[in-house]
Amino acid sequence: GLGRLADIKDIIGSICQVLGRSGDLAGKHIVVTAGGTQEPIDPVRYLSNRSSGKMGYALAEAARDRGAKVTLVTAPTSLPEPVGVDVIQVGTAQEMRQAVENVTLRSDALIMAAAVADYRPLKAAKDKIKKGKTGLTLELECTPDILGTVKGNFIKVGFAAESSNLVENAREKLKQKGLALIVANDITAGDSGFGTDTNRVTIIDREGKIESLPLMSKRKVADRLLDKVVGLSEETIVYCSLREEPRIGFSKGQEPLFSKRKGTLILETAIGNITVSYNPKYDEFGPRGVSKWLKWLKKNHPELKAGDKVRLQ
Ligand code: CTP
């Protein structure tokens, strides 16, 4: 009621959020998923897994504390909802997919820490299934692969829960699902993976770089992963200057950027935003490609003057 002190953890959460406002994720919208989805068998039973949601919740809080607007799409867990985070509660893989598709429309990154059930009963029984004398066979069908099918121009990060061939399997998932990063988790270790407060992970990027982190709290893992996400989002911004002879200044070296991403690009220019589509197949992000663009811009938008800045994002 009026005058009652808020819960200490809510106060701490709010303070962390305020202190993080100018953090390195300020202005970014990060979507995190967490928990194990529940696929109904009948009104009282469901298929699920041992995910506690701790890794996803730690990520949501860490991103909040670095200034991001965070949306947490969570399957049922026993964890309290983090303060200062938009929380969307879902049950099934299908509901999670719907929520993820809606909230990623204008997001900068999607981090899928949820353990999505791979199978669901073909048909959930309307009434409680009664105990019979013989066994029961359930027919299962595949759930949608959320991470592998969600579309949009944001950084995609996945988790790979593996019990063998950790790096190999994780690499394959990174490739198959078109991810920027994958966090490989050995779920056979007692001190990491499902249910624990600590985790020992290996982070792999799409260039094939592997970083094996020692055992640490899930919150620390979250921050190490977000360091990489910040690095990636810096890389995806290129500043160009329109000169007489188009020349390009990349924010990070002279390497081609966005090399594997395809879609729509917004050029923030002195005359407003210009939307163009691009195809990485044609090396449009290499120095030559960008140079070609600048020529195109000058030809098609004579109102742009030499020296105007163009920001590709
Ligand atoms: N994932 C997803 N949708 C699914 C299954 C998984 O979005 N239906 C996501 C997970 O959230 C995780 C990544 O994909 O970020 C890898 O999940 P994992 O369970 O390790 O791999 P699967 O693709 O399910 O493959 P497998 O179970 O055969 O190892």
Image (cartoon, rainbow, N blue to C red):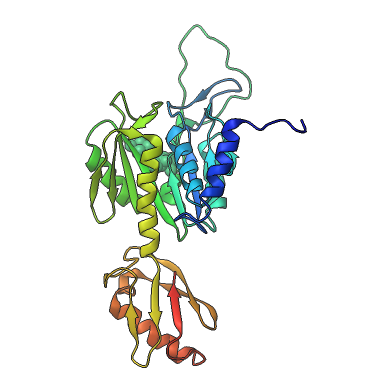
Look at the picture and state if 241 lies above or below 86.
below
Q: Nearer the viewer, residue 80 or 134?
A: 80
Extreme-right residue of the structure: 2
Look at the picture and state if 240 lies above or below 49.
below
Q: Position of residue 46 (x, y in %)?
A: 52, 24
Picture mark count: 0
Q: Position of residue 311 (x, y in %)?
A: 44, 75
In the image: residue 212, left or right of residue 296: left
Which residue: 46% across, 55% down?
A: 25
User: Dividing the image into four equal quarters, which quarter contains ligand 1?
Assistant: top left
Q: Tell me where residue 58 sits by quadrant.
A: top left
Which residue: 47% across, 16% down?
A: 136
Q: Position of residue 252 (x, y in %)?
A: 31, 68
In the image: residue 172, left or right of residue 263: left
Look at the picture and state if 126 lies above or below 64.
above
Whether residue 145 is visible to the viewer of this picture, yes or no, is no
Which residue: 44% across, 51% down?
A: 149
Q: Nearer the viewer, residue 167 or 277?
A: 167
Q: Quadrant of the N terminus?
A: top right
Q: Tell me where residue 114 sits by quadrant.
A: top left
Q: Position of residue 10 (x, y in %)?
A: 60, 35
